[in-house]
Amino acid sequence: MTLSNDKLKETTVSTEHVFTGKVISLQIDTVQLPDGSQGKREIVKHPGAVAVLAVRNGRLLLVDQYRQALGRCELEIPAGKLEQGEDPLEAARRELEEETGYRCSKLSLLHSFYTSPGFADEIIHLYLAENLAEGEASPDEDEFLEIIEATFDETQQYIAEGRISDAKTILAAYIWQQRLSVHSGSQGA
Amino acid sequence: MTLSNDKLKETTVSTEHVFTGKVISLQIDTVQLPDGSQGKREIVKHPGAVAVLAVRNGRLLLVDQYRQALGRCELEIPAGKLEQGEDPLEAARRELEEETGYRCSKLSLLHSFYTSPGFADEIIHLYLAENLAEGEASPDEDEFLEIIEATFDETQQYIAEGRISDAKTILAAYIWQQRLSVHSGSQGA
């Protein structure tokens, strides 16, 4: 199987730019559907982001942060948007240190995934950080954060309570669990 | 720890409605930050969605579908938006049958998660479907789909190739893997 399935392909007829913001922009694409008819697709454009699975002394690094879209705080793994032209690996290193104060000497890509392919092009590059050392946190000026270090059981409890409730962090918890069972008895990631 | 962390709370000062579409709407919230200064938050409103982890005879049900946001086809687990006032469990049952033609007699909620809490309120309710029986597929009129039934190894291969590249489907694959190793030797989900 290849990446293209021509029977299902939609072709862009026109694009209407509706909004350009600081984080996202919005466009309405008119597309020609496989049966020849036309449809509209509402598309959010996003610069992409990185997220970091970082475990130190058997504890997952989490960031507590207010999320206006949810109207409440949420615990998430460290993450942030890509800056213009920025390499995702460098962005992951930067976000980890800015948000948590930890540096790492090894970063490996676990997955790159789309968060909402039905209406957005946001992609998140999820890295595993290893060999953590303390540095200095320096969040962006409009970021207000608290760092939480959670054991595996605490992480599961936060998921059950809804304190952790976003896709990337729940996915990271499963990856952590899988790695724990692969390296059984290990406290690392 | 409670769900609120008052030190991090942002308060909505005003909301500007920018766009209302068929799937999403967009608003700009002006918020008061914890230090008393003001910031802007670009927020996409979405009705919420359901997704279904369904395994039949050791094969994961996947839907091949063109995604305009990505400019290509993608394999995803069956999923769809909630209709106005619709119960998520009923929506999961409906989407599974509409998209794949399979009915199921048992649906259990695995996780409800936000896809992009930084800029969107979309929540996906992910269900495990059991006891599948053949029914009749009836996709929406602007949905063009193909059903793929993938073994566990094929699913891993699709993830490695990027044919599966969205958060909910990769998460579902980890959950499937965990359940396979819990019920070791079983071919069920």
Image (cartoon, coloured by chain):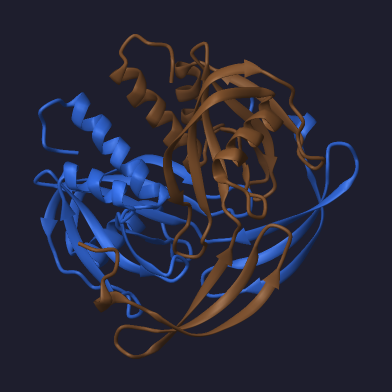
Chain colours: A blue, B brown
Q: Does residue B82 appear to the left or right of B182 in the view shown?
A: right
Number of marks in the rendered image:
0
Q: Residue at x 26, y 61 (%)?
A: A63
Q: Is residue B72 visible?
A: yes
x and y, in percent, of residue B3 in the image: 29, 63
Q: Residue furthest bottom?
A: B36
Q: Does residue A9 appear to the left or right of B50 in the view shown?
A: right
Q: Is residue B115 above or below residue B10?
A: above
Q: Is residue A160 above or below residue A4?
A: below
Q: Give the camera-side residue of B181 and A159.
A: A159
x and y, in percent, of residue B42 in the image: 53, 73
Which of the image's four quarters has the C terminus of chain A?
top left
Q: Quadrant of residue B149?
A: top right
Q: Is residue A111 above or below residue B183?
A: below
Q: Residue furthest right?
A: A36
Q: Quadrant of residue A170?
A: top left
Q: Is residue A1 visible?
A: no
x and y, in percent, of residue B21 in the image: 72, 64
Which of the image's four quarters has the N terminus of chain A?
top right
Q: Residue at x 44, y 60 (%)?
A: B117
Q: Give the camera-side residue of B92 and B106.
A: B106
Q: Residue at x 30, y 54 (%)?
A: A77
Q: Residue at x 20, y 69 (%)?
A: A137
Q: Quadrant of residue A24?
A: bottom right
x and y, in percent, of residue B118 in the image: 44, 64
